[in-house]
Amino acid sequence: MNKGATVEEKLHIAEQGLASENPLRVYGDTLPAVFPLELLVPEVRQQTPAVGQRVTRPDGRMHGLGQTRYIDDMAFPGMLYAKIKRAGVASARIV
């Protein structure tokens, strides 16, 4: 598009671009650049590769066999233990 084009000519060119089969056009002082729509949206597999796939947890087998060790199952030498004593009755005092 040349710089000396009138407003009506620019509007006419823009309307032709909107009505064409290639909807994404960038107009400027140079030739229009066309961006195909297919390249703008990645395939579904590229967006979400994990959907529909099995996931193996590294600790899944241990959980299934009941062999998972939690922090409460561990004992260390010289380890201190504590327990919280709460009142069995509301508003009661522990003496």
Image (spheres, rainbow, N blue to C red):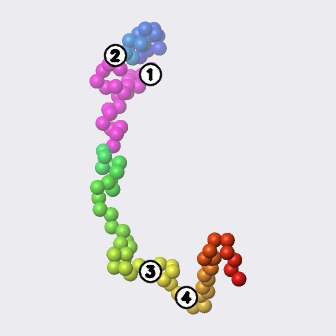
Q: Earlier in the sequence, mark 4 or mark 1?
A: 1
Alpha-carbon span between mark 3 and mark 2: 70 Å
Mark linked to residue 16: 2
**In the image, residue 22 lies in the stretch drawn in magenta:** yes
Residue at image coords 68%, 80%: 94
The residue identified by callout 4 is 76
Q: Earlier in the sequence, mark 3 or mark 2?
A: 2
Predominant SS along the magenta part:
loop
Residue at image coords 35%, 20%: 18
Q: Left or right: where does residue 89 sit relative to residue 75?
A: right
Mark linked to residue 69: 3
Give the residue furthest to the bottom: 77
Alpha-carbon span between mark 3 and mark 4: 14 Å
Within 10 Å of disc 3 (Cα), the crowding (few <14, some 14-19, many 20+) is: few
Residue at image coords 48%, 83%: 73
Tag 2: amino acid: Gln
The residue identified by callout 1 is 28
Residues tagged 4 and 1 counted as in contact (Cβ below 8 A):
no
Look at the numbered disc 1 and give the secondary structure of its residue.
loop
Alpha-carbon span between mark 3 and mark 1: 66 Å
Alpha-carbon span between mark 2 and mark 4: 79 Å
Tag 4: amino acid: Phe
